[in-house]
Amino acid sequence: MSSKDENIFSKETLMTTEAGKEIMKQAMFHSKGYKQFQQYKEKSETEFPEFVKRFVTDLYTEIKGDQNPNSTLSSFIAEVGADELSLENSKIMDVKARLSDPNTLTDRVKRILNSNYVKMTYPVFHALFDGANSYLKLNLSGETKNALIDGHIIAIDLSEPMDRIVDKDEDLEYLDDYKLMNPYILKIARSKIAKAGDVVSKSFEDGFKDARAGQYIDYKLKQKPSAISDERMAECYKKYRAVMGTAGKNMAMSKEPLGEIFYLGMARAGESVGCGNEIEDSLKNGMIKVPSWPLYYAINTNNVKKAFDLTIKKSNLYLEEARLALEMLPDDFETKPFLDFLFLTVKHYNQFWYNELKKVDPFDGFEQKLSAIIKN
């Protein structure tokens, strides 16, 4: 299991949740799901550094060779419709010069790759691709596999610098660098995904459009948290659903019905992890995350503790839907045991942060800050 905090999956921590105990049981008896998961985890740990090198090399080439970074950034801002991601023209050349140093660029890339979504997803894409390649008898090359997985991981990683710029809660001294990196990250992701063909490329573009729509709702709710509603949260969660679901679909080369099954499983798993992230972020930041399911439930129940109880239930509902996708897969699907085990790790991850929250018991402090949040 992989995450930003490896302690979450230590033996001691696994024993603190129901899902964790099941993980330990499967590890003890070397279940097929556990063995497949370990295989892909170890494979990813070996290959991830090479992915980082490819990413840095491509990013360096794009940034260094761009003669008009002002235009590149302007075009990106126009496409995503987020002026807060812009950078003053007077700073652009200085930032470009800084990022033209390979060591500096490597540092920035490693910072944004230190993401739960990246670390937890990288081995999953390998397993989905291998399962689809075998089941559909696609005989796709290792080069196509790397391009497709690299492209989607890079696209998912784009949300990291964008979120840090908007939220201003992490890496404050590097936000100008991230602003200039964004358009090149998207360009590289598109270029790699396009190598898998027009159908896969179109699928990505459709998903990226939906993800931007979700990100826009997220931004608007940050400006006016009191406008939160069930429908707006569902729209906001497109930022998880579209990105993760589309990536899953494309691991099957967007071929139906397998692509649709992958979409459902990855979309709902992504939304489930989203709930866990909201609990984690609320705990670490000392206030309910805006926007989030905990905020929605707190406003509508006037009970902060109950809001987090409902959020963990929401995460389990998402995960139950992800399991429906698992049941839709053919019985002989090669990496089905891996996916079954994966969902256990997601449940443990969410439950771990919920337990940590209850242990700290920050609810009175959250309650005091809630009225200030919803004044907007």
Image (cartoon, helix red, strand yellow):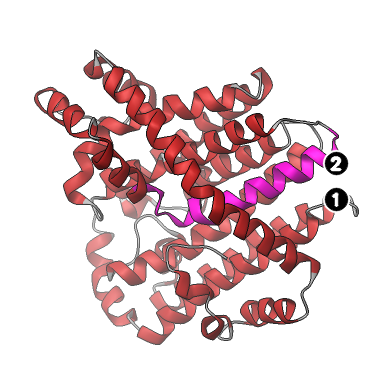
Callout 2 amino acid: Tyr
Q: Quadrant of residue 22?
A: bottom right
The answer to whether the residues at label 2 and label 1 have Cβ atoms under 8 Å apart is yes
**Horizontal relation, residue 303 to residue 141: left or right:** left
Q: Which residues are magenta?
A: 112-137
Say which quarter of the image contains residue 200: top right
SS class of the residue under badge 1? loop
The residue tagged 2 is 135
**Would residue 15 be visible to someone looking at this image?**
yes
Q: Earlier in the sequence, mark 2 or mark 1?
A: 2
What residue do we see at 23% from left, 33% from top? 99
- Residue 52 spot, x, y in % from top left: 44, 43
Give percent across and percent down for residue 45. 54, 56
Vertical order, 196 against 245 (above or below): above
In space, the residues marked 2 and 1 are separated at their CA atoms by 7 Å
Residue 114 among those drawn in magenta: yes
Residue matched to label 1: 333
**Residue 190, magenta (yes or no):** no
Give the residue at the far left of this rendering.
Answer: 90
